[in-house]
Amino acid sequence: MEGIMSDDATPDMTDGDGPAQVRAVGVADDAAEPAQPMPVQSTPYHRLATLRPEWARWWRPLTTAFAITAIWLILASLLMVGMVLVLTALGADRSIGQALDDPTSPLDVFVRSALGALLLPAGLLGVRLGGWRPTSLLWSVADRFRTAQMGRMLALAVVAVALATAMQTLLHGGRPALPESGRTIGVVLVLLLVAPLQAAGEELVLRGAVMQGVGTWVRGPAVPILATLPLSLIGAMHSLDTAFTAVFIALASGVLAWRTGGIEASIVLRTAVLLTAGVVGLLGMGAETTIWFGAMLAFLVLVNITGYTRRDSSVETVTVLGGDRGPFFPVMRSADAPVPPPVRV
């Protein structure tokens, strides 16, 4: 009996020659090694919604689109009602142009720009509620808004717009006719304050939500980029020039988002185009399509020459998705957090 027990019993953990101690040491050594980030396949910007299976459900883009549309319609209705109430309280003219196409009217310029700016909160809330994923991935593959790249792109945009404006001035010739000083100052202030928000909102929805949503269905970048064209043509079909410009902006912005790995460059491009076109319309110089096309073409050429489209275009590890979100943690859930269970109401 004693011999049998010596053959079958597990050796003492304190026995230096026992295999159990060898296994225990191996486990301790493994636990002592620092945790390595789990590598994933290089993921381009339009495929970021596929980093987790629950984000890439086939119906997620549909619920996201519904949520964004519903939220934007609610916000737009509140904006229009608020504008009417404010104008009534001030005793001002309550008529707002149906087309909102008077470039010399601060009210028309504000309403048109504000409607686009409302896409920013609508897109963030829609992706969070409809797509149930972090909104920070809408900005870039770095899981954040890259301010350093924004500065580089802004410098290139200033050069591009300056070149396009000089070209338009030479082609137009003559001295531009300025409206009255009050209207001019009002339009310029509205453009400076609201146009960047309008650009950010439109790019976050079109290049962020739409491209990443379609990117859950297809792998290549062509279809997600082309999917934004119909939405870009909304409100731009009253002339061939505006339709052509909207298509060109959509294609250029989509390529920039794909190549740079984020929407910083496309936001800068759209902001520059909106500001320049607003000033051109205010001065009555006409031919806005010429300056839009010139500014975008110059910007794209400069971006490709400097090589910025080859940087930070994909994400290599999932470590960028972790970390504390501070006060916005409930909205921007960490990617490695468990999926919240359904709640009955």
Image (tube, grey):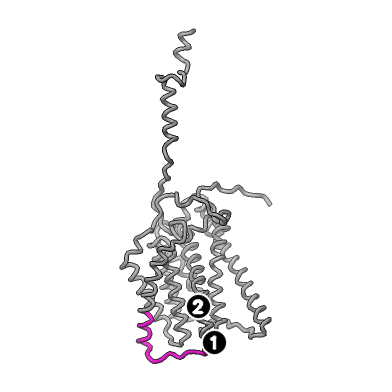
Q: Reply above or below: 196 against 291.
A: above
Look at the image and say whether residue 207 sits in the magenta stretch. no
Percent across and percent down for residue 264 are 43, 65
**Along the line of sight, the residue nearer the viewer: 336 or 52:** 336
Please tell me in which quadrant of the rendered image residue 91 appears: bottom right
Label 2 neighbour load within 10 Å: few <14, some 14-19, many 20+: many
Q: Which mark is residue 182?
A: 1
Marker count (numbered): 2
Disc 1/disc 2 C-alpha distance (Å): 14 Å
The mark closer to the camera, 1 or 2, is: 1
Label 1 residue SS: helix
Look at the image and say whether residue 170 sits in the magenta stretch. yes
**Along the line of sight, the residue nearer the viewer: 175 or 304:** 175
Percent across and percent down for residue 259 are 37, 62
Q: Is residue 312 left or right of residue 83?
A: left
Percent across and percent down for residue 191 are 50, 77
Magenta range is 164-180
Percent across and percent down for residue 124 are 54, 62
Label 1 neighbour load within 10 Å: few <14, some 14-19, many 20+: few
Q: Which mark is residue 191?
A: 2
Tell me if I can see residue 75 in this picture. yes
Q: Reply above or below: 102 against 12.
A: below
Please tell me in which quadrant of the rendered image residue 308 appears: bottom left
Label 2 residue SS: helix
N-terminal-most mark, 1 or 2: 1
Q: Is residue 219 left or right of residue 209?
A: left
Residue farthest to the top?
1
Amino acid on which the number 1 mark rests in the picture: Gly
Amino acid on which the number 2 mark rests in the picture: Leu
